Each structure stands twice: as structure tokens, then as C-alpha cells.
């Protein structure tokens, strides 16, 4: 493996990208800072493929990242491998309006291999390669220049280890026939809509106890206002207004700008300055949230009822049993909202009732809610058993 010095010029980057474009796959990671800005500051990009590994410095004066961004987002012949790549994909989307494709995420793949729902990178490396990673440079200031050799080595290690792990994972997935399980998940991760960060949807990130259309309408307007202020000033959302203050403003809207001086979490100066005026304009221009936008109640799916809630709990127990039996993360088989929808009578549009999920879990889940499957305890172990009617039907067939 040829590990290149820190890449700071476009010509070197282009030559490397030409070589990486001939590979079946490349592994990718980024280092960034976002503590004091709205937009994440990209500080380093690490790539490995074939015989070449390098860290690219996007902060180097005059460097053009186009060859690399084209490789990641436009070259469909090269698979891009990440680990827990959500924030990496967000950064690439912010730069290009596109996401890497085709895509493979080793954290998601680990779910299909019984390694939990969110295995960390260091644990992944330890479990597959028997290497303990030195975490000394993990919390470094990646925006500070010059970078030390120790920092660069640590960063490149993230992709060189992944270069060894991915083929091993792929082989294991092929052996147990679970490779196809991940196709849908990887396509979902690569969907650019996940990273568009629409200001009109920002309110969904803020927890508020009320479900009143008027309150949520104000929350939507306020969250949009905060998003635009944060973007314009390139500051974290919380530096403009914290979530709890935003929720308080939505629930108890001030009548006049002067009243902002009494709101906990706001500066008294907002009672007379321009940002306070823009906040009041957002409140005054808010409309009640439409019926279509109102979120479902968090406690239970609408129409679930008390009996349905008990059935949903049984489905969750079944999910735990099935996930244990086949050694897969339960989150990959089904999500809680799907189980509640099934218990409430929904029979279409649920991922757990389609494809491999139906074979591995959905069929049993459907049988349980429709009375063809029951729980039993055998020698102290909880198992599933077919009801007498179902067993007779299977024998007759």
C-alpha cells in the first residue's frame, strides 16, 4: 500500500483519482468541525483504493476538489465504502448537491451480521482485524494547520483498515446469503433527500408537548426563521435560539416585540433590535399546521386502541426473538412504528411485509396478529408455536 503525503495540490489529486477510478471500490472518510458553525467545515478527506491511500487537504490554497467529487458522485463504476457515513454524505451533498453512489456502509452491513445496530469504528476494526486503534488524535482540532504526521496517520488509518474489512464483510454476507438484504438500506442512505435540510421541515427536530395546529404552525414558522438566521450568520442553530426557547415561544407567543425581554433564553436587546423584529414577523405570519402535516401521537398509532397496543407489544417481543434467532439487529427487520401500524390493521406499504423482511419476520408477525401463531415456553425457553388450526392446515396441505 502506497500511503501518499498530505495532498495539497490539484494535479496530485487528479492523478490519484485517475487511479482510484480503475478500482472496484474505494473507502472514504472525512474529518470536519461544526461546533461553532452552521455548515460543517470540511478539514480533511481520506480515500483508499487499490494500492493508494491518501489524505486530501481541502483547506489548502488553490486546490480544486472536482476530480475527487466527480469520482464520488458521478462515477457509477466504483463502489464507495463508508462507516457510519451519514455526516460524510451530508458534507458531500452540501458541496455538490449529490450523494456518493453506489454506496456501502459497513455499520449498516454489521447489522445484518449480528454486530448490533450501531457498532463503532474502533470496535469494528477490533472485531474484524484484531487491531486496537489509538484514539489519541480522535478529538483533535482538524482545522488547525499545519497538521502533525500523527494526525494524518490516524486519519488515513480509518480508510486503510476499512479497505481490509470490506472484502471480509462482503464474503461473509455472500456466505450467509444476506447481501441482498442490504440493497434497499444502501439506496435509502444514498437518497439525496435525506441531506437536503429543508427549512420548512426544521420544526420536526424540536420537541414540543402540544399537538395543537396553532402551536405547531408557530413552531414551523419559528424553526424556519431560526434556520435562515443560522445559515445567514453561519452559526449553530442553538447559538441563535435553543430548542426549548423555541418551543416556549411557539406555545406562549409574545404579543409585542417588547415582550421578548421577558422570555427566558433571549437577550433583552431583542425587544428592540432587528433580529427580534424578524422573530416577531415569523410569529405573526404563522398559519396553523395543516391536518396533513400534523404528526401522529407519539404514544400510539391512531386507531391502535388498548388491545392493539398490547398486540404491538407482543410484536415487539416477537421481533426480539426473531432477531436473536437469526443473529441480526432488530432495527434491520422492522421498526416500532411499523409494528404499531400492523397491530392497528395496516396490511400494505410496510417494508416488513415485503421481500426478504417478509420471509424473515413479516410472515410470522402477520400470523401472530391474525391468530395463527402464539408464544410458548419450552424447557424454560420462549418460543413460537403454530396454533392448532394453522398446524392442521399445514398438515392437510
Image (spheres, grey):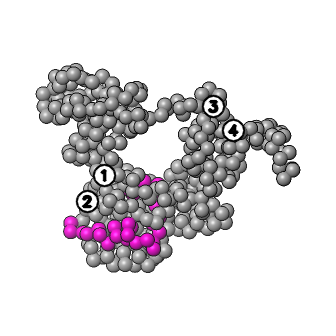
Decide if residue 305 is on the left or right side of residue 150: right
Residue placed under numbered mark 1 in the picture? 40
Residue located beneath label 2 in the image: 145
Query: Element at badge 1?
Result: loop
Spatial distance from mark 2 to mark 4, Cα to Cα? 60 Å
Q: Which residue is located at x 72 percent, y 43 percent?
A: 367
Label 4–label 3 contact, CB within 8 A: no
Whether residue 53 sits left or right of residue 369 in the image: it is left
Instruction: Tell me which corner region of the image, top left, top right, bottom left or bottom right, holds residue 211.
Output: top left
Residue 154, above or below 348: below
The disc placed on residue 243 is none
Where is residue 64 drawn, in percent x and y?
A: 25, 69
Which sits in the foreground, 359 or 235?
Answer: 359
Residue beneath label 4, please?
Answer: 369
Percent of width and height locating residue 243: 33, 33
N-term-proximal mark, 1 vs 4: 1
Q: Which residue is mark 3?
A: 308
Residue 175 in picture, x, y percent from top left: 67, 66
Amino acid at each position: 500500500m502506497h500511503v501518499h503525503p498530505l495532498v495539497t495540490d490539484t494535479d496530485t489529486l487528479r492523478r490519484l483519482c485517475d487511479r482510484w477510478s480503475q478500482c472496484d471500490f474505494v473507502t472514504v472518510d472525512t474529518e470536519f468541525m461544526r461546533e461553532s458553525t452552521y455548515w460543517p467545515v470540511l478539514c480533511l478527506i481520506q480515500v483508499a483504493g487499490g494500492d493508494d491511500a491518501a489524505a486530501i487537504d481541502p483547506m489548502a490554497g488553490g486546490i480544486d476538489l472536482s476530480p475527487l467529487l466527480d469520482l464520488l458522485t458521478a462515477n457509477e463504476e466504483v463502489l464507495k465504502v463508508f462507516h457510519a457515513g451519514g455526516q460524510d454524505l451530508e458534507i458531500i451533498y452540501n458541496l455538490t448537491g449529490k450523494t456518493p453512489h453506489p454506496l456501502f456502509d459497513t455499520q449498516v452491513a454489521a447489522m445484518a451480521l449480528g454486530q448490533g445496530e450501531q457498532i463503532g469504528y474502533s470496535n469494528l476494526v477490533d472485531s474484524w482485524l484484531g487491531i486496537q486503534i489509538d484514539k489519541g488524535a480522535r478529538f483533535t482540532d482538524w482545522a488547525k494547520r499545519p497538521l502533525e504526521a500523527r494526525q494524518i496517520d490516524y486519519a488515513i488509518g480509518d480508510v486503510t483498515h476499512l479497505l481490509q474489512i470490506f472484502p471480509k464483510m462482503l464474503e461473509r454476507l455472500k456466505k450467509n446469503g444476506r447481501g441482498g438484504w442490504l440493497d434497499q438500506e444502501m439506496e435509502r442512505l444514498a437518497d439525496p433527500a435525506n441531506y437536503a435540510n429543508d427549512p420548512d421541515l426544521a420544526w420536526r427536530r424540536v420537541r414540543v408537548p402540544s399537538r395543537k395546529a396553532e402551536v405547531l404552525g408557530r413552531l414551523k414558522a419559528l424553526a424556519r426563521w431560526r434556520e435562515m438566521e443560522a445559515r445567514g450568520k453561519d452559526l449553530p442553530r442553538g447559538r441563535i435560539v435553543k430548542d426549548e426557547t423555541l418551543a416556549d415561544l411557539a406555545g406562549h407567543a409574545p404579543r409585542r416585540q417588547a415582550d421578548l425581554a421577558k422570555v427566558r433564553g433571549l437577550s433583552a436587546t431583542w425587544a428592540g433590535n432587528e433580529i427580534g423584529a424578524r422573530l416577531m414577523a415569523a410569529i405573526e405570519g404563522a398559519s396553523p399546521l395543516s391536518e396533513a402535516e400534523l404528526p401522529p401521537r407519539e404514544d400510539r398509532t391512531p386507531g391502535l386502541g388498548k388491545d392493539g397496543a398490547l398486540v404491538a407489544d407482543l410484536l415487539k417481543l416477537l421481533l426480539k426473538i426473531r432477531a436473536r434467532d437469526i443473529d441480526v439487529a432488530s432495527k434491520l427487520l422492522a421498526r416500532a412504528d411499523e409494528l404499531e401500524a400492523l397491530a392497528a390493521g395496516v396490511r400494505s406499504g410496510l417494508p416488513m411485509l415485503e421481500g426478504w423482511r417478509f420471509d424473515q419476520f413479516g410472515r410470522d408477525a402477520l400470523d401472530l396478529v391474525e391468530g395463527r401463531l402464539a408464544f410458548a415456553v419450552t424447557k424454560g425457553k420462549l418460543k413460537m408455536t403454530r396454533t392448532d388450526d394453522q398446524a392442521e392446515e399445514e398438515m392437510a396441505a
